[in-house]
Image: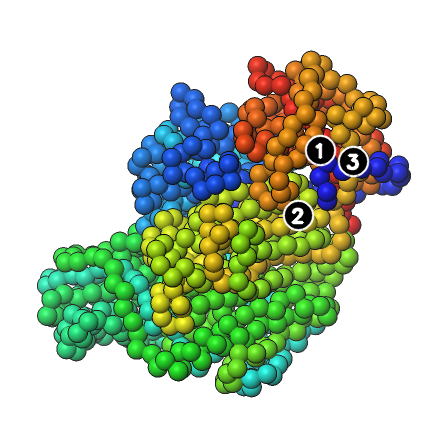
Amino acid sequence: MVMFAAGVPAEAQTAEPPQGASVGPVGWDVYRSLDGLAALRPGAQTKQFSSFDRTGGNDDGFRGTYSCLRVTAEGCVIAEKTGAGEIESMWFTRDQGAMTGNGRLKVELDGEAVLNGSLQDIVDGRLGAPFVWPLVGNGADTAGGSVIKVPMPYQRSMRVTVQHNPLFYHLTYREFPDAAGVRTFDPDDRALDVVDRLRGFGIRDPKPAARLAKTTSAGADVPDGATRQFAALTGPGAISQLRVTLPQVLSEPRVRDDGRAFGAGGHSSFRIAIDPGNTGVRLTRRVDPAIGHQVADVTVDGVPAGQWTTGAPVAGGGWVDQVLELPPSRSAGRAALRIATAFVASDVDVNEFRYDVHSRVDGQWRRTDVLDLGPAHPGEEQAHDYQLTMQTWQGDRTYRYPRDPARLAASQAVLSGARLRIAFDGKTTVDSPLGEFFGSGLGRFDSRTMLSSIDATDGGSFTAWWPMPYRRSAVVELVNTSGVPITGAGVEVTAAPDPGAATGLRPGGELGYFTATSHAGSTKTGADWPILDVTGRGVFYGETQTMRGLISSGNQRNHLEGDERVYVDGVASPQWYGTGTEDFFESGWYFRDGTIFAMPLAGDPAYQVAGDGCRYDCTGAIRLLAGDGVPFSSALTFGIEHGPVDDSPAVYSSTAYWYGQPGQGLRQADSFDVGDDAGRAAHGYAAGGETRETLTSAFEGTKINGPVTKVSTAATGPVRFTMALDPRNSGARLVRAGDQNAAYQRAAVFVDDKLVGSWTQPLHNTTHRWLEDTFALPMRITAGRSSIDVRIVPEGDGPAWSAAQYRLETLTIG
C-alpha cells in the first residue's frame, strides 16, 4: 500500500454481518493452547515499545537517551497504553545483564499495580510463581539479558515503570479492539501447569495430547541429488510431531559450557524426569578429563546404581561424554528419579557440566530431561533441585570433542544442503535446510526450544512440535542437494484426525497452513536482511538465523549491532523497532561474547570462531513468539539490520516460521488527506482550534525512504468526519498519519456518538516526525454499516491532536 494515496470509498453493500475477528488466546491460554497456533488472529495487533535510537543511529540504550516515554515521581515510564490488550514479553539489559541498576519494576493494569518489586529479584525468580524460571530469566539464564514472559492481559489500560533509566529494553504487547473475553491479569494465579509445561522445553511436546494420534516411521538412504518420500498422510488431520534421525551426522566439536566441581566428602544431587513406560534410563555426563582419576558413586533414590570414573588426566582438556545405564528395576513405572553423585577419589575434584537423560521406550532411546548446570544456568539448577556440597570450583570451559575433519565437513554439508520438504494439500509450504529448520544452521549443536529440539548426543534426533493441519493430504520428503550421500535416515511422523481442518483451511478460513520460509545469501549494504516478506493473511511465530560475519579484524561481531524492524498491513511506521540482533534473541552484549544458552522461546545454541567451517565469527540463534506472534491481514515485512546501519558484511541464512493463507483480510475502504480541501469537504471534516503547517520529515525505519512533505494539522478541539466502509466487515482500523513531534497525544474516539475508547499515543521523535498509528474499531460498532461518523476529542491538557491523513481499513473473514 502506498502511504498518503487517497482512496475511493467502497460501494455500499448489504449482507449479514460476519463473526468478529479473533484476537487469539488470552492470558495463560497463550501457553495452554499451543495446539491452536494455526488459528489466525486478525483482530489483534502486536506492537512494541523499545529504547531504539530515534535518529536511526546506534544509540539504542547506551546512554538511555530514548529509554523513557516520560519520567514521573516513580521513575521512567517505558510503556503506556489505553484500551484492551495484553503485555506479552519484557526484555532488559545493562551492565552485562545485571538488573540492580534498574531498581524497581512496577506494572499497572487497569489502574492497579499487579507487579511491583526489585527487577533483579523478579528475573531471579524470587517472587515465586508465576514469576519463576523459565517464565522469567536473568542475565545468567539468557547470556546477558533479562526476560519476563508472563502474559498479562488488561481491559482498559497498562503502564510499566522502571525506577531508574533501564538503558536497553523492549516490551511487546497486543492491542485488542475491545475487552470481550479479557480478564485482567491476576498475580495470585500461580499457573503451575504452565510452569511445568515450559520446564519441559525441548524435551516433550508442549501441546495437549491429540486424540487418536498415530505414529508412522520410515527409513531410507537418500543419495546425493535424490528425493525420498517418508510419509504420505490423508486428511483432514494435523501433524503434531516430526522427528528425524541422521546417524552419520556428527555433533560439533567446539563447545563452551559452564559447570561445577566438588571435593572429598562432597556430593551433588538432582531430580530428573523420565518416561514411566521406560524399560531403562541412560544418563550422559559431560566431564572435563583434564582432572584425572575421578571416581564418584551414583545412587538412584539412595540405592547404588553405578559409578563414574575417568582415567589419567588429559593434557589441555577436551570434552568427554560418559554414559551410565541405570538398573531398570530402579526406573520402571517411575516419572521422576533423584540422582546423587558422591566423591570417592580424584587427583583434584569431581566435575560435572551437563546431564542428558534418555528413557528407553518401545525399544528406542528418547531424551526425557536435560540438566545443564553451572553458574550460567541458575534456572535449570533450581528447576531440578540441584544440590551441591563441598564445592571446589565453578566456571566455564571451551573445549573440543575429537572429530574427523572430513566426516565433520560431510555432516555440516548434510545439515545445510539437505532439505526438509513438506507439502500440504498439494502445495509445498516447507522447503528448508534440515539443520536450520530444527534450530541450528551451523551444524549439529544441541538446541532446545518450546517447539523444537536437536539432541546432539549419540543417536539423538531432530524434533519439531509445530502443529501442522491439512485438509486432504500431507507429504513429508527429504531432498538431498548436499553433495553427500545420506545413509540410514529415519523420519517419524505423529498425526491425528482433525475434522476442524476441513473447514478451517478452506479459502478464507480461520486456520493457516504451517510454513517455513528459508533463504540464504550475502547481506547488502543499506538493506535489511529480509527474514519474511509476504502478502496474504497469517501469523509470524519466529525464526532461526545463521550469521557468518565477514569482518576480518577489529570488532568481528559488529553485524550483531543490527536492529529488527517489523511492518504490518501496509502501515508506514514499524510496529516493532528493536535495539540489536542479540537483543532480539533475548540475550545481550554479543551473547556475552559467545556464551550459548537455551530458553523456551529463545536461544543461542551455536557459536564458531575461525574454524570448523567458519571463516571469522559465526553465530546461530533462534527466537520463537507465543502471545507476541505477529498477525497480519494483508502483508508483513520482517527484516533485521546487519551492523549499526546495514553496513557490516556477512553471509546470512534464516528460516521463518509462520502460518498463512492467501488472499486479503484487510482492505482500504476510505481515506482522505486532512490538508486537502476537496477531501475535507467530501468527508464532512471539521476541527476545533485547528492549525496547519507543511511538514517535511521522515518516517522511522526504511519502508518509506527519505523525507516526505505533506500538510499536517493540529487540533485542540473536537475533530469530526465521516468515512465509508464495507458493511460485511468483521471490524475496522482507523489509520492516522501525523506528526509525533509532541508526545502523549490523547483523544477520546466516538463512532456515531458512541464512545469507543481512548486513542493514546505516547511516542515522540523530533528527527523522524512522521508516524502512522492505528486505532481498532470493534465489529459491534462497524458491522452492517456502510458509513460511520467519527469524532475525535483531545483529552486533558496534552498536546494538540495531529493528523495529515486518515484511512479506514476493514477486516473481513470467511
x 25%, y 72%: residue? 318
Q: Estimate how packed mark 3 is, as few (under 14), some (14 to 19) or many (20 or more) residues with alpha carbons within 10 Å.
A: some
Q: Nearer the viewer, residue 10 or 356?
A: 10
The answer to whether marks 2 and 3 mark residues whose Cβ atoms lie closer than 8 Å is no
Residue under numbered circle 3: 6
Q: Can residue 733 be seen by looking at this rendering?
A: yes
Which-is-in-front pick, marks 1 and 3? 3
Report the side of 511 relative to 727 (left or right).
Answer: left
The answer to whether marks 1 and 3 mark residues whose Cβ atoms lie closer than 8 Å is no
Task: Give how far across and how far down residue 514 sits, in percent.
Answer: 63, 61
Q: Secondary structure at mark 1?
A: strand
Report the side of 188 relative to 570 (left or right).
Answer: left
Q: CA distance from mark 2 to mark 3?
A: 22 Å
Q: Amino acid at mark 2?
A: Phe
Q: Amino acid at mark 1?
A: Leu
Q: Nearer the viewer, residue 646 or 667?
A: 646
Q: Amino acid at mark 3?
A: Ala
Task: Give the vertical position of 5 relative to 453 (above or below).
Answer: above
Q: Estimate how packed mark 1 is, as few (under 14), some (14 to 19) or many (20 or more) residues with alpha carbons within 10 Å.
A: some
Q: Secondary structure at mark 3?
A: loop
Residue 682 marker: none
Residue under numbered circle 1: 734
Query: Which numbered disc flags the more N-terminal residue, 2 or 3?
Result: 3
Q: Estimate how packed mark 2 is, as few (under 14), some (14 to 19) or many (20 or more) residues with alpha carbons within 10 Å.
A: many
Task: Give how far across and how far down residue 678 sits, in percent.
Answer: 83, 26
